Image (cartoon, rainbow, N blue to C red):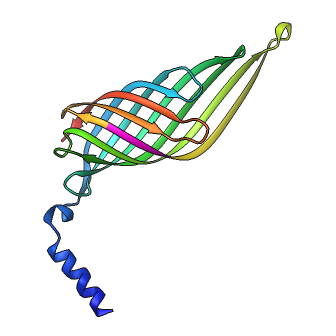
Amino acid sequence: MKIYALVALSALLLAPPSLLAADFGLKGVEISAGIAAPQDFDTGYALGVDLDLGDITHSLTLVASAEYWKASGRDFGVDLDADNLSAGVDVRYYVFEPRRGLYVGGGGRVNHLSSEAAVPLGGFGTLVVKTTDNKVSPEGVLGWSGGRFYMEGRYNAIDGLNTVSVVVGVRFGK
């Protein structure tokens, strides 16, 4: 048991300073808008807000986010609408320097999905069917930050409704 404690203490003391540089706290707020392309729907719009919660290490940043998208479509004469309000947490790895340049990352989201189908019944009007569902999903992120402005692509692997969104945004803070 003592040997494990000694190894752990040695690893901690010999670790590069960048591995011990956690600096948590609100570092910035990002607001974005763009397009969303959910599976089996036409392209819609996406709106989002991200909270930069600080550094895990020199190049890894923790980000909490919320996103809303809405899309429509038409299939076999049925009008389809879908929207998603989601919240999640991502870890971003900045390739060159913190909060600037190319970054990749991923995380998880909790999605509140709503969908509506309007089925025309000829002279009898329209039958409207609404559904809601909550799903947890993994996601991947690829983006570029120029300091104040950024562009990001996000793949949200929602079961039965995989979604790709591309947004541009502005950053307030560090």
Image point (22%, 81%), residue name: 9
Left or right: residue 68 versus residue 24 is right
**Percent from the top left, x then y, of residue 109?**
48, 46
How many numbered tags mark residues here?
A: 0
Q: Is residue 91 above or below residue 157?
A: below
Image point (44%, 27%), residue name: 46
**Percent from the top left, x then y, of residue 131?**
69, 34
Q: Is the N terminus in the top left, top right, bottom left or bottom right quadrant?
A: bottom left
Q: Is the C terminus in the top left, top right, bottom left or bottom right quadrant?
A: top left
Closer to the camera in the image, 67 or 93: 93
Based on the displayed image, in which of its 4 quarters is residue 148 positioned?
Answer: top left
Image point (58%, 23%), residue name: 41
Considering every residue shown, the one lying at the far bottom of the view is: 2
**Percent from the top left, x then y, of residue 120?**
77, 13
Closer to the camera in the image, 46 or 38: 38
Considering every residue shown, the one lying at the far right of the view is: 124
Q: Which residues are magenta?
A: 138-142
Q: Is residue 81 above or below residue 22?
A: above
Image point (58%, 20%), residue name: 72
Left or right: residue 122 versus residue 61 is right
Based on the displayed image, in which of its 4 quarters is residue 56 positioned?
Answer: bottom left
Left or right: residue 28 versus residue 91 is left
Q: Is residue 143 above or below residue 58?
A: above
Based on the displayed image, in which of its 4 quarters is residue 103 positioned?
Answer: top left
Q: Is residue 80 magenta?
A: no
**Percent from the top left, x then y, of residue 133?**
64, 40
**Magenta region's main secondary structure?**
strand
